[in-house]
Image (tube, rainbow, N blue to C red):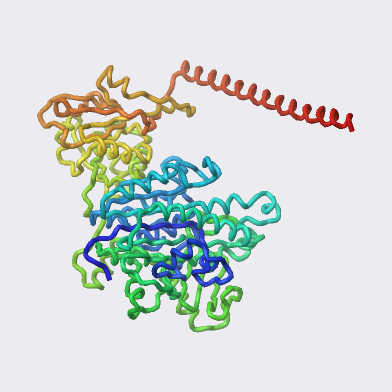
Amino acid sequence: MPSKAKPDIIWILIDGVRPDKLKSCGNLKRPLLFLDEILLKGTLLTKVISADANTKTSIHAAYTSLYPSINKLNAFNPMYLTELDPLAVTLTDILHYSGYKTFRYQDVVKWQGMVDIEQSIPTSGFDIWESSGYRRIGDTPRHSFSTIKRDAFITEFNQTPSPKFAFIHLWTFHDLNCEGIDKRLKAAGYFGPTSELYENNLLEASEDFKDVWDKLQLTNENLVVVSTDHGARLDFPSIYEEEQQYGVRLRDISMNTFCSFIGFTIPRQIINNMVRMIDIVPTILEIASCEQLLGQGRSLLPLIRGEKFSELHAFMETGGIYEKPSSTDESNVWGVRTEKWKYWKHVSKGEWLIDLENDPEEEINLIGKDLPIKDYLQRLVQEYINDNRTPEQIYAEKAQAKGISRYFMKRQIVPEVSLFLLVQKENPHLADIIDSILAQICVYFELIIVDTTPDDRAKIIVEKLQDYRISYKKYKLNTSLTSIISNARGKYISCISPDIIYKPYFLYELRNILRSKSEIALVYSNYIYIDQVGFEKIINAEKIFKKKSNIGYCFFARKEAISKMTPSGTKIFNNDNLCLPLIEDSLIFHTSQSFGYRYHRAGIYTLGLHFLYKVIDVGRKKVIRQVMNLIKIGKVLKMIVKRDFVRSFL
């Protein structure tokens, strides 16, 4: 089936669509939507079981082809997104390694500290990482995610030479459902959408999908994947009470999804066999003739071709969001599903055994009926819970089983950037600074800890992290910076300050500037001072550079621009005794963006000014509120007078 040329790959994910609400997936009572028409253009799989019931864990499992407990992202809590095992290979790691230019677009973005809490996929391996810039559809100018930025993203993708890959995550359906749960429904006890609301919003989501589809310049030589991430509970007036009584359930209405592989000689057909979301990426890679991802999934290409394909087991897990206490930081229910049976085990609420063939609504618990299948499925789930293997162990075991001697691993990726963290004194924020580097998006890097302190405190922090991207070495205090940089593997370098918490897109944004401006040797940015009471002040690094030749805390340089001969050069702001020796006449570029936070203790005078400004600001806002209230009162009085004036003529 695959040809020698690598196809362009587009994966479009429409958030939160239940297959049983689509005509293409078997619900003949529903109208034929544009989405249905596209799904039927390829091989449509109508029973694709998600590894989890929420977006972040289900898509991370799909991208790594590893179940949540293995890739370490098994938490509903979005602040745990940085916990993904750094050794877990992703789809884009392999595509990037195979020569693809990789794009990602998501309709929503919500940065909170080091985490975009709406992020749904691993960031590694991406060249382009974009979003609309809006937190929800209600913030958009026309109440639509069909924005200028999305159009620009699609245009750039269309114009990029092959091979290329794009992941496009559409949130219209998700946000419309969230908006529709108004106060009236909540007052009636509904904390999820009703069927009527859900089905009406699906019409609009299909039109939003059409907007994207029509703008992509697709041909039969492209491989297009259209899927969703999880289902939804509808018409549940008492979600809280249900979860508190039974615990969260792994029901098909939440776990069942769909996926269609379109184009690139994929046949048109509907397959109702149960498969898993962790099988999508191995299928994409085999169709595209790329390196294999030896995770826990299997390629579905034999099934698509009509060849013999053995039955699969789909493991599932999730946390009880509405339970008391809730379990958002880790899973508390685990299960397994086959074509005909489903079993799940809750940490405190007992077990469920469902005969899916005779009880598709999953209402009858067969635990206690002494059915032999129960012991078999129970043993599978317990083995899954006790599985403590690392991603690399799974890759090695699967390679051995397949007789493969060479396979792709994360360690073999040459870092694009070499970062040097200079530790010259005790620092209470050191662990947080390292965490901010490990949370950097899209850029492959190595972090080299340059420790000149007399103790081993920095070493202890590094050993606890056990991250392959970090290396640690003791140096003498006066060791030449140039001699350390010469051993770097990355083509870009940066010195990380032990006093700065870096924003997660620090490396990504500065790298993109150097990529787009080949004449620039070094780019540096502004940063922000935060004092002990939380007041922020943007520091203009360009002004400091003009006065003292200090480039500041946030910079990014080409390694080739570093001179091995020059004894002095541009200073690094946090260590005046250290210089970055650049080749003569190297161009330096400043961006006004701010990519780091530096904590400092402000003096009494500065704190007094902050307090005064705060009082003035509060006073100003109070005056504005009073004026607005007076305007409202005036409008009301005007209406009353007008009404009485009209009545006098009646």
- What residue appears at the point 60 percent right and 76 percent down from the top-left corner? 364
Q: Which quadrant: the C terminus?
A: top right
Asked whether 411 or 382 is in front, the reply is 411
Q: Residue furthest front?
A: 649
Residue 304, placed above or below residue 57: below
Asked whether 102 or 90 is in front, the reply is 102
Residue 351, placed above or below residue 482: below
Asked whether 25 or 36 is in front, the reply is 36
The percent coordinates of residue 400 (x first, y second) are 23, 71
Count of number-bearing discs? 0
- What residue appears at the point 35 percent right and 59 percent down from the top-left corner? 64
The percent coordinates of residue 455 (x first, y second) are 27, 37
Q: Is residue 436 rendered to the left or right of residue 555?
A: right
Residue 384, placed above or below residue 519: below
Q: Is residue 496 rendered to the left or right of residue 480?
A: right
- What residue appears at the point 39 percent right and 32 percent down from the top-left corner? 597
The percent coordinates of residue 259 (x first, y second) are 42, 65
Asked whether 274 or 102 is in front, the reply is 102
